[in-house]
Image: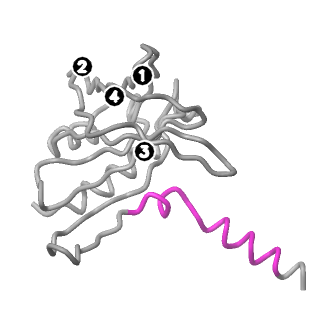
């Protein structure tokens, strides 16, 4: 009996791929009937495709602001007061706009800082079609972390989350 339960549990865990975890969820608001699309945070790339970053990106979109997309940025394993998010997309540099204060998440497995940043849907599409889409997230203390959503055409799991939301946006 224990062996059957163990095999079943391993089968369930093996079935959770990054593609399934980053799937976009589409909902309709009961309040104003707006369409909302979101995907959970997934890790970006660190120094290369074999090293994931401690910075995760998810995405949210609503038809109440159809030309904008919110990137949910999660800084894992530390508490940081996240400040500025900048992108270098194939040499074009732009900043995302921070929406509100950094939130703290903690459970028995991890601690993290999380903040929402806004970019245009057009900028998100540029990130997704880039050869190199690098980012720098800075803190109020002046520290920063560099990483990439796309690096030398290698796509991170964060790329999948953002892409899954952008693909669902109606034209």
Q: Counting other residues with Cα less than 10 Å from the Cα at mark 3, is it few (<14), some (14-19), or many (20 or more)? A: many
Q: Earlier in the sequence, mark 3 or mark 1?
A: 1
Q: For the point 84% across and 82% down, which residue is it?
A: 4
Report the magenta stretch's main SS: helix
Q: Residue at x 16, y 42 (%)?
A: 120
Between discs 3 and 4, the one toward the N terminus: 4
Quadrant housing residue 168: bottom left
Task: Give the secondary structure at mark 1.
Answer: strand
Between residue 126 and residue 107, name the one nearer to us.
Answer: 107
Residue 21 among those drawn in magenta: yes
Say left or right for 14 vs 62: right
Q: Nearer the viewer, mark 3 or mark 4?
A: 3
> Which span is picked out in magenta?
5-23
Q: Which residue is mark 2?
A: 91
When asked about the image quadrant of residue 98, the answer is top left
Q: Residue at x 24, y 65 (%)?
A: 36
Secondary structure of the residue carrying numbered label 3? helix
| Secondary-structure class at tag 4 | loop
**Given this view, does label 3 or label 1 mark the residue nearer the observer?**
1
For the residues labelled 4 and 2, the Cα–Cα distance comes to 8 Å
16 falls in the magenta region: yes
Q: Which mark is residue 132?
A: 4
- Residue 158 is labelled as 3
Q: Are marks 3 and 4 in contact (CB under 8 Å)?
A: no
100 shown above or below 6? above
């Amino acid at each position: 009996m224990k062996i059957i339960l163990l095999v079943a549990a391993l089968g369930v865990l093996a079935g959770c791929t990054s593609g399934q975890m980053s799937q976009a969820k589409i909902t309709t608001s009961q309040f104003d009937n707006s369409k909302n699309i979101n995907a959970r945070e997934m890790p970006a790339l660190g120094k290369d495709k074999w090293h994931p970053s401690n910075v995760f990106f998810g995405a949210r979109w609503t038809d109440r602001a159809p030309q904008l997309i919110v990137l949910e940025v999660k800084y894992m394993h530390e508490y940081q007061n996240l400040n500025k998010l900048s992108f270098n997309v194939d040499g074009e540099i732009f900043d995302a706009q921070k929406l509100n204060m950094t939130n703290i998440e903690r459970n028995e497995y991890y601690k993290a800082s999380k903040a929402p940043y806004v970019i245009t849907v057009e900028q998100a599409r540029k990130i997704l079609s880039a050869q190199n889409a690098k980012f720098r997230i800075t803190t109020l203390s002046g520290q920063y972390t560099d990483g990439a959503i796309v690096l030398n055409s290698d796509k991170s799991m964060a790329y999948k989350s953002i892409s899954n939301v952008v693909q669902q946006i109606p034209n």
